[in-house]
Amino acid sequence: MKITKTLMLLSMIAVVFGCKTENNDKKMAYAIETNQDANGFNYETVANDPTGLRLYTLDNGLKVYLGKNEEEPKIQTLIAVRAGSTYDPADNTGLAHYLEHMVFKGTDKIGTTNYEEESKLIKQISDLYEEHKKEQDPEKKKEIYKKIDEISLEASKLSIANEYDKMVNSLGAEGTNAFTSNEQTVYVNKIPSNEVDKWLKVESERFSKLVLRLFHTELEAVYEEFNRGQDSDGRKQYFATLEGLFPTHPYGTQSTIGISEHLKNPSMEAINAYFNKYYVPNNMAVIMVGDLDFDTTIKKVNDAFGSYEKKEVTHPTFPELEPITAPVKKVVLGPTSESIYIAFRSKGKGSDQEVILSLVDYMLSNSQAGLIDLNLNQKQMVQNASSFTNFDNDYGFHMLYGSPKADQTLDEVRDLLLSQIEKIKKGEFEDWLLDAVINDMRLSQIRQYENGSATAYAYLDAFIGEQEWSNRLKMLDEMKKITKQDVVDFANSFYGNNYVEVHKQKGEDTSIVKVENPGITPIELNRGKESEFLKALNEIESPDLKPQFVDYKTAIKETKTDNGLKMSYIENPNNDIFNLNIIFDMGQDNDRMVSLAAGYLDYLGTDKYTPEQLKQEFYKIGISYNVFSSSDKTYVGISGLKENLDAGLALLEHLWNNAEPNQETYNKYVESILKNREDGKTEKGNIFWNGLMSYGQYGENSRLRNIYSQAELKAMSPTELVNKIKEMRAYNQRIFYYGNAVDEAKVALNTHHKIPETLLDYPEKVEYTNLETGGNVYFVDYDMVQSEILLVAKGEEFSPEKMAASQLFNTYFGSGLSSIVFQEIRESKSLAYSAFSSYNNAAEVGKPNYTMAYVGTQANKLEQAVGAMMELMTNMPEAEDQFNQAKEATLKKIASQRITKSNIFWTYEGLKKRGIDNDNREEIYNTIKNMTMEDLKTFFNDNIKGEEYNVMVIGNKKDMDFDALSKLGTIKELDIDYLFNYNQPEALKQ
C-alpha cells in the first residue's frame, strides 16, 4: 500500500528536491521565464526547476512538455488528452475507455488495405449498432448482432490487425499501452532516442482520424476486462467508496469501465462524437522526457502535429456536491479477506487542502514513523493499516485503510484508525515530525526523479490538472510554512463525521453480471499484408544506435574493510543517496528460521529504545533499514543521504547487537503470520500464481510448502529467533555499497560493523526437485466470473545458448500486443482479455527452463481459448514480415538498453547464478542479428512443440466444464490448505 501511496504522492507534488529550507523571496524562487529557441519557438522555463522542463505551446494550442535525461538513449513519451470517464455520456458509460482501445486500431491509412471499401462496411456496422442499441427484444437483438458479426468478418478481410502495434514494436518501443481515468486518457510508449522521426510520423497519423475497425472483437475484450473488475474485490470496494463520496458527481456515478448494459449496447456514433470533441490539439499534450535535443525535437513535434486544427473545447461542469454530514456506510461482498476503507472528501488538485492533506497523510502513515505506523502496525493492533490521498480536478479525498486481526471486527479497526485522526486533532504528535515528513518526501523525490519516466508523469499530472508547473514546484516550500498549530486547526475543521466507510466482507456478491458467449466468428488477421503507410515508414532510415555492453570486472570496484570483508562498490554519479548492503550467501533454503527471525526483528526494541522510538530515530535522520531473507540470500542494509550514513549504520548495528526478545510481541507476530495465511487463502492471485504454480512445478516437496506449522510457530522461543539474527554476523559475508564518498562508507563499516576473526561456512541448502510435467490438471474452486488457466512444461536445463532464440521467440510469439498469441486469442477470436506464452530461462545454472502459456477468460469460453492456445503451441504460425519486425524490435531494445548505477552490480549477481561472468547481451545481440525464420522454427520444434504440460486452473466450480478439462489430463481438485500446507493434511480430491 505504501508503494502505491508514494507513487501517487510523487505524481501529485512533482519535483521539489532542489528546494532549500529557506527562501527569502518565494515568488522569485520559481519564476516563470519566457524564452525563444534558435528556430523561433517560444517556451517557458521555471527558475530553479531541477527537471529543466521546457514547456512549449504550439499555434494550435497543443502543449509540448520536453525534459532531458541522458541516462539511457530512450525517451519516455506520453500523449495525453484532457478527457476521461467523467465526461462519458450518462447513457454511454465506459465510452472514453473503449475509445482508448480503438485508437490502437489505425486510421484511414494505418491498418487497412482498401479503406474506401472498408469504410462502407464500417458504416453498415455502425448503423446496425445504433439499431441494436434501440431494439428492446432480446431475440431481435441477437439477429442484429449476427448481422454485425457477418459484416465484421467481411470488413476484416480489408483490415490489417495490430498494424499500429507492429509499427511501434519494430521501433524498439517498450511499455506500449494506454490508460483512462476520470479526466484523462493517456497513450504511452518508451522509444529509442534514434526513432523519434518514425514515432512522430506514426503518432501524428494515429490521432488524425478515428476508424472504428474490428469493433465487435475489441468490445468483447473490453467486456472481459469488465469481468476482471467484477473479480476484483479491491476495485469494487474502491468504487463503492467513490459512490459514497460523490453521490451526484460522475466520480461516483459512473466508473471508467462502465456498466454492463452500456458495454453490450455501444454506439459507434457516440464514440466518434467524443473523439471529435475532445481529441483536438488545444486539449492535448505531447510529453517527451529522455535523451533528446530541445531545439531539434520541438521542430519535429511541430511538423508532426502543428497542422492539427484547433477547436473550441468546453468540458462539462457539475453542480457542487452537498456536504457529508453523517457517516455513510456501505458493504461490499466477495471471496477475499475483510478490510475497511474510511474516506473524507476534499477539494481538488491545486487547492490549499491538497498541500496540508498531503502533509497530514504522511504524518499518519509514512511506512516508518507515522502515527498509524507506530501505534497500529508496530504495536500489532491491527493486521495492517495505511492511508493515502488522491486529488482529481473537481475533488479529492483522504483515505484510511485497515484490515483486522483474527479476533477483530471492522468496526474496531475503524475506531482505531479514527483514533489516530483524533491524535492529530489534539496535537498529540512530536514537533519534529513535520520537518521529518518533508525531508522524507524530498528524499523520495530525489530517488524517483532520477528516472525520466517519473518526470514525464509529473508533467502529465500538471497538464491534466491545468496546473502551472511552477505551482507544483512550490508545493513543498508551501508545506514548510505549515506549523503544528496549522495542522491541528485544519484537522479539527476537516475531520468529523463527514466520512464514508466501506466494509469489505466475505460473502457472495449477488450483483455479479454474467453473459452468454456471443459466438463471434474469428476475423481475418492478414498478417502478411502491409498498408501503404507502413511501406513508406519502412523507407525512412533512422540514425544508427549502437548497443553498449558492460565490463563488469572494471565497472564494479573492490576494496576490503579492516576486518577483511570484500567490499564491492559503484559510485553514484547523480546525487548523495547511498545504499549499503551486507550480503550473506545463505537464505531460507539454508535455514528457514532466518526469514522468520528477520520479520520478528522489525517489531523489537533494544536496551536503549522501545520499538517505536527506534523507528522514530531512523526516521529523524532519513534512514531506512531492512533485514530480508530470500531463498538463497540474506540482506542487512540501510539507505538514505550519505551525510547520515555513519549515524544510520551505528543505529542499525545497535539494533542488531542489542535487540531484546519480547514474548507478547512474538505472540502477536505469530497471530499475524497465521492471519496472513488465512487472508492469502482468499486471494485469487496468491492461490494461482504462488500455490498452483509451485505445485505444478514441484508437487508436495516445495519451498512454498516447507513452512513452520502453527504448533511449531507457537512453540518457538523468541530468544532463539533474536539469537539467530545476532549470530548471522558470524557467517561469511560481503558488502555492496552504491553511493559517493566510498572511503567514508568504509570508515563507518570499520567503526561499527564488528565481526569475529573467523567466519562460519553456511548451512547446507535444502534442494527441491522440479518434477516432470504432463497429464495433470490441478484445479482450485474459487468464486469468480472469469476462469484462469496456466499451462506449464518442464524443459531442458538452463543453457546460455538458448537465451537469444528464446528472447526473439517471446517477442514474436507470445508477449506483447503484436505477438502471435495476442493476435489469435484476443484480436481474431475475442476469447480472452489477457493471453500470453513464454519460454522462461531458469535463473540458476543446473535448473530447468519452462514453457508457459496463460489465458484468462469467461468460463464459457475456456474450452475454445485453451484449444486455440494448444493449437498455437503445437503449430507455430510463420509470418516472415512479422518475424522481421520482431527481430528488429528485439535488436533495437538491446541497443537502447543501458545497465547503470547499482543495477550493474545486481545484474552481475544474476548472471553469476547462471554461470555467466560477462555481459552476454553482446552474444545474444549478434546471435539474433543472424537468425532466420527457419532458426526460430527449429527452436520452436526443439523446445516447445510436443511438450507435456501440467495444467493449473482456478475458477468457479459450478461454471466449469470438467469434461473439456479432462481432455488435458487427469483432474485433481486441490484443497487450498493442502496446497499451501496449512495444517490440513487432506490429500487430493479425485
Image (cartoon, rainbow, N blue to C red):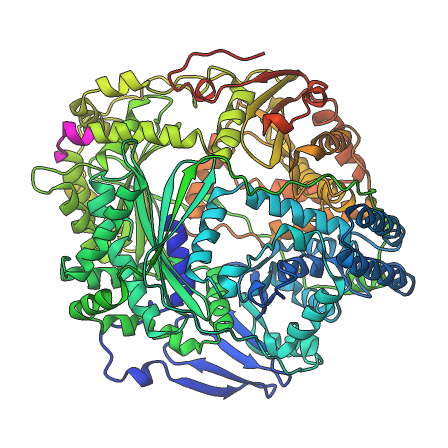
Q: Residue 274 at x, y = what percent?
A: 68, 69
Residue 323 in view, yes or no: yes
In magenta stretch: residue 713: no
Horizontal relation, residue 149 to residue 93: left or right: right
**Of 682 and 693, the residue lying toward us:** 682
Residue 571 in view, yes or no: no
**Of 777 and 905, the residue lying toward us:** 777
Name which quarter of the figure residue 852 lies in.
top right
What residue appears at the point 16 percent right and 45 percent down from the top-left corner?
612
What residue appears at the point 16 percent right and 69 percent down from the top-left corner?
485
In magenta stretch: residue 662: yes
Q: Is residue 440 above or below residue 615?
A: below
Horizontal relation, residue 257 to residue 766: left or right: right
Name which quarter of the figure residue 807 lies in.
top right
Q: Residue 787 at x, y = what percent?
A: 62, 33
What residue appears at the point 71 percent right and 81 percent down from the top-left corner?
307
Q: Residue 694 at x, y = what percent?
A: 51, 24
Horizontal relation, residue 413 to residue 236: left or right: left
Q: Is residue 644 above or below residue 874?
A: below
Q: Residue 223 at x, y = what percent?
A: 66, 47
Number of labelled discs? 0
What residue appears at the point 41 percent right and 56 percent down from the top-left corner?
7
Q: Which residues are magenta?
A: 658-666
In the picture, the quarter occupied by the C terminus is: top right
Horizontal relation, residue 422 to residue 111: left or right: left
